[in-house]
Image (spheres, grey):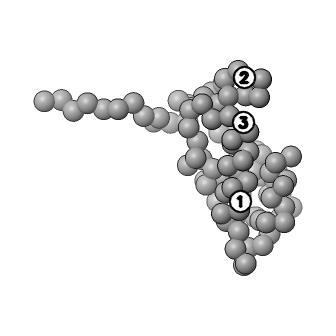
C-alpha cells in the first residue's frame, strides 16, 4: 500500500507573493534579506535572527504588506529589556 502525501511547500520557490497591485510573483528570499539588512544597519541588531523569524511565517499567497507586518512582529518578538535596540527602531522596517 502506497502512502499518500499532501501537497506541501518544499522550498521558497513554491511560494507566490501578492504584490500591492494584485499581481503575483515568485518569492525572492534575497529581497527580504536586503530589507532586513537595511533596516538593521545602524542599530546593531541581529539581522540573521530577524530574517530567520520571518521566513518561518511565509506561505504561498502572502502579500507584501503581510511580509512587512511579519518583519515588525518578529522584531518585537526579539525585544527584551536586554535587547532594546530592536524596539526604538522597529518603524524602519515599515518604511
- CA neighbours of label 2 inside 10 A, class few (<14), some (14 to 19), many (20+): few
Q: Quadrant of residue 48?
A: bottom right
Q: CA distance from mark 2 to mark 3?
A: 10 Å
- Do tag 1 and tag 3 residues touch (Cβ < 8 Å)? no
Q: CA distance from mark 1 to mark 2?
A: 27 Å
Name the element at disc 2.
loop
Q: Residue furthest left?
A: 1
- CA neighbours of label 1 inside 10 A, class few (<14), some (14 to 19), many (20+): many
Q: Is residue 45 above or below residue 59?
A: below
- Do tag 2 and tag 3 residues touch (Cβ < 8 Å)? no
Q: Residue, x 73% and y 54% (percent of image)? A: 72
Q: Residue, x 73% and y 73% (percent of image)? A: 83
What residue is pinned by disc 2? Answer: 22
Among the two numbered marks 1 and 3 on one chain, the one whose residue lies closer to the N terminus: 3
What residue is pinned by disc 3? Answer: 64
What residue is pinned by disc 1? Answer: 75
Name the element at disc 3.
helix
Amino acid at each position: 500500500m502506497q502512502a499518500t502525501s499532501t501537497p506541501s511547500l518544499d522550498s521558497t520557490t513554491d511560494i507566490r507573493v501578492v504584490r500591492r497591485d494584485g499581481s503575483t510573483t515568485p518569492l525572492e528570499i534575497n529581497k527580504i534579506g536586503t530589507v532586513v539588512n537595511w533596516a538593521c544597519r545602524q542599530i546593531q541588531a541581529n539581522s540573521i535572527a530577524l530574517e530567520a523569524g520571518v521566513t518561518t511565517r511565509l506561505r504561498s499567497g502572502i502579500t507584501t504588506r503581510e511580509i512587512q507586518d511579519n518583519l515588525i512582529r518578529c522584531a518585537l518578538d526579539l525585544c527584551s529589556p536586554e535587547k532594546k535596540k530592536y524596539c526604538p527602531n522597529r518603524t524602519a522596517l515599515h518604511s
